[in-house]
Amino acid sequence: MGKTAFSKALFALMLVLLLALAACSDESASEEADDNGSDEGTEDAEGTEDDEEEEEEEEVDPGDVVYSIDDFNHTKTNEGEAIDGGTLNFGLVSDTVFEGTLNWNFYQGAPDAEVIEWFDESLLTIDENYNYTNDGAATFEADEDANTITFTIRDDVNWHDGEPVTAEDWAFSYEVIGDPEYTGIRYGADFTVIEGMEEYNSGDADEISGIEIIDDKSMEITYKQLNPSLLAGGAWPYAMPKHVFEDIPVAEMEEAPEVRENPIGMGPFKVDTITPGESVTYTKNEDYWRGEPNLDGVTLQVVNPNVVVQSLETGEVDMVDSFPTDQYPENAEMSNIEYLGGVDNAYTYIGFKLGEWDDDAGEVVMDDSKKMADVDLRRAMWHAVDNDAVGEQFYNGLRWNATTLIAPSHPDYHDDSIEAPTYDPDTANQILDEAGYEDVTDDGFRETPDGDELVINFASMSGGDTAEPIAQYYIQSWEDIGINVQLLDGRLIEFNAFYDMVEEDDPEIDIYQGAWSVGSDVNPSGLYGPNAMFNYSRYTSEENEALLEEGVSEDSFDIEHRQSVYSEWQELMVEDVPVFPTVYRAELVPVNNRVHNFSIETGTDVYRSDIAVTEEETPAAE
């Protein structure tokens, strides 16, 4: 298995579980075989050629191939010459319909965001580390002494109906989100930090005192305390056409036809038709501020994950927003497709319940009596699992061992020099021995240092084919060091029910397996701060709070200082182990060969208006 090794018993368990995932047939294995075989004669021991026997070509099961995310391009290779116009067919991979809340202020699910991105866009662009730049439809200037940011919209930026995008439109977006009748989910710390916003939200003020319209294209926002997070996704970058929405009560906006049926934006394409929840057709916005788009239009349709391969093979779609990585090995050589790949903004983790959420105080409260309160027990459980092997065996290398709670999707802040616990059952056993966890009853499982039975309830959610075997692998790994871990209620838990139980601090849950998609801002306070509802482990400490506060301090406008702070924080979380990351993830995006000028790279200067095609029809696989 490369650099790691399993015990024979554990290896046997994984083989049994993997067989349940259905390997490919002999025919498909043969089609995907590599070139290790030979149809020439082989030389015998005496140096003579044996012409009667030929070495059979070795068949390679695609499921056995291990890939590296480093082998994928971020940007599509352009083949052939692009034509004028043409229509792109885009697949939105989802097992449900999209909700159809098509406005940045109100949408909630990622599928709706995929629909919106084709016709509306942020006024601010980002670089490779998700920091705002001045290359977008608007520019900004921050004044740290005055705690202000001045935003200026370019003169040639217009809504699809021809009206200019103005500073009033941008301010109106803030007013809608801050309105007491607002029905969306955007209102939070990035808005309450604006002077006068809380008074406006409570109904004690008729306007937001911290937002000043300077002229048609410029506005200034004054913050209670300017912080670096505001320049990394924190300042709301989306305008809302005031001339369209100003006569609609805020409480009714989310369900209005202007959101559901006839949305407009400022992006490279205009919405033409919507089949609710199923598809959207777009036509090009000839007045787009970056210049007229290359394509005549785009057709977006929902594609079920079960048929995404077929849709790509037949040419029904040119590309999809995401691709199930477990389907990649069998389809890596699809002849009409180039796969783009990058590091996803996400990680999977094991969390330990260390306290509860105090709803009245709005803060986490640690509890030293919790079963998982001993950091030695938590650290030993981290050493017991081989996450490199999990990535190789279950994801063919397209997920890999995670080390810290800031993922490599943020390269300036992920500290790969930190020595996190790695697979080492001997060290795990030594830690437990020295901490007093001994098998006093001779049943193969350790008791607590007080001699009490130790049974740890593990909550893990249902999902794809790998969910059950991965959960069982972790359970077996912990059993191998004498820790008795049992699936809560003996089964995996449905997604929504799982998060309800975790969020409500169900007392039966001791540990759980979760996953986070992380935002553009590297600041981890929203997941691990003392006032963060999403801090599901319910961990905090004075050092944790101090580092999180320092990460958004005035000193942290200096990127080197902020990097240092978040390196210390990553190290602290490795030491305290309130959770431990298991695997980082690859993002795969297959793109038809006829497509030009497309990139999934963060901070790229390749935009949707640049996309082109080389022929009218999408070619199928050969």
Image: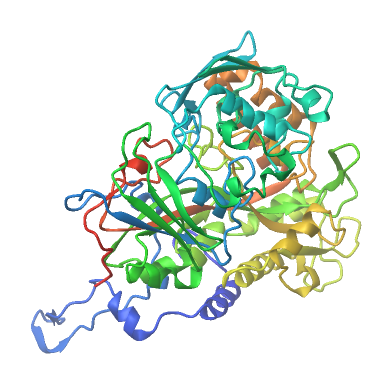
Q: Relative to residue 41, is residue 156 depicted above or below?
A: above
Residue most toward the bottom?
52
Q: Position of residue 60 (x, y in %)?
A: 33, 75
Q: Relative to residue 594, is residue 152 depicted above or below?
A: above
* Relative depth, front residue between 144 and 431: 144
* Relative depth, front residue between 527 and 237: 237
* Relative depth, front residue between 89 and 480: 89
Q: Position of residue 137 (x, y in %)?
A: 44, 28
Residue most toward the front?
247
Q: Position of residue 476 (x, y in %)?
A: 67, 69
**Residue 529 seen in the figure:** yes
Q: Relative to residue 543, is residue 377 depicted above or below?
A: below
Q: In the picture provided, is 217 more to the left or to the right than 450?
A: left
Q: In the picture provided, is 439 more to the left or to the right than 303?
A: right
Q: Position of residue 243 (x, y in %)?
A: 57, 32
Q: In the picture provided, is 283 more to the left or to the right than 379?
A: left
**Residue 431 seen in the figure:** no
Quadrant in which the C terminus appears: bottom left
Q: Relative to residue 381, is residue 601 depicted above or below?
A: above
Determine the residue positioned at 32% across, 34% down: 291
